[in-house]
Image (spheres, grey):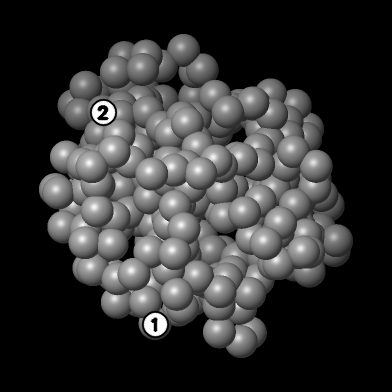
Amino acid sequence: MTAVLQRLPVTLVDAFARRAGEGNRAAVLLMADQPAGLSDDQLAALARELAEPVTVFVWPTGPDRARLRWFAPSGELPSCGHGTLAAAHLLVSGPDSSGPGQISFDTPLGVLRADRAGGDPRISMPLVPTRPWQPDGVDLAGLLGVPVLEARRSDRHGLVRVPDAAAVRAVRPDLAALAAALDTVGLAVTAPGEPPYDIVSRWFVARHGLEDQATGTAHCLLAGYWAERLGRDRLSARQASANGADLTLQVQGNEVLLAGGAVTVGQRGVEPGWSR
């Protein structure tokens, strides 16, 4: 193992946050001086060592382009909005800086663009359409503990509309029971928001036994659903998790532009276990 891999610099970013402790944490490794040929097992091992919700590996490939992959401690992720926003926060400069004002990320999800909107990092992600859903033999209201007004799903995720923001906050699901009952990965519970928000939601990943704190992927479903229901393509969203997160959504054709604050909360070095 080369000496350059003995200790890797890591930047910790809270994404969709205005202050430290809000939103969702990401560990970002800018791999400009590291070989792109690290094995998947090595990348996964680093993510397990860091033990953050997501570890984002970024390999610059040009002045305004980079390759990007996301790993949770459990393994590689097919998509991650908050990790992408964290990378954009570090790489995309504001109008008064000499750095790039926009960047394209080559990811497992395709090419995602990043820039800034009103000073906040902003990323594009694919819009995820949903269809009506009634899981056979499943009492969604009973599992969630609140009335369910509508249920929809995509190929991977579910969306449940409940009466109001208070009902969203009141949900206390049995995640093990949800995982056993549903074949979806993530489940958004959502309602119209309270001013100044158009919509409010929470996002549960039952098979991993957790509620996610700030989730770009969830808002790829929510943006299209609520844009059609409310009759407008710009939305202000609140994720009512314990940390809390604010997002601005804009539907543009088959994409969603997601913007929000991001805060650099620290830097550390990690010595990969295989190099010790």
User: Judging from the image, what secondary structure is the residue with disc 2 in?
Assistant: helix
Q: Quadrant of the C terminus?
A: top left
Give the percent coordinates (x, y) of residue 107.
59, 27
Q: Quadrant of the N terminus?
A: top left
The mark nearer the N terminus, 1 or 2, is 2
Give the percent coordinates (x, y) of residue 274.
21, 22
Q: Nearer the viewer, residue 12 or 164?
A: 164
Give the percent coordinates (x, y) of residue 100.
80, 45
- Amino acid type of the residue that numbered disc 1 sits on in the rendered structure: Ala
- Most extreme residue toward the front is 137
When asked about the image quadrant of residue 74, the answer is top left
Which mark is drawn over residue 151? none
* 1 or 2: mark nearer the eye: 1
**Residue at the (39%, 82%) spot, across then down:** 166
User: Judging from the image, what secondary structure is the residue with disc 1 in?
Assistant: helix
Callout 1: 10 Å neighbours few (<14), some, many (20+)? some
When asked about the image quadrant of residue 73, the answer is top left
- Amino acid type of the residue that numbered disc 2 sits on in the rendered structure: Ala
- The residue that label 2 is drawn on is 45
**Residue at the (19%, 52%) spot, across then down:** 175
Residue 27 visible? The answer is: no
Which mark is drawn over residue 166? 1
Give the percent coordinates (x, y) of residue 156.
43, 34
Q: Nearer the viewer, residue 220 or 180?
A: 180
**Residue at the (78%, 32%) spot, across then down:** 63
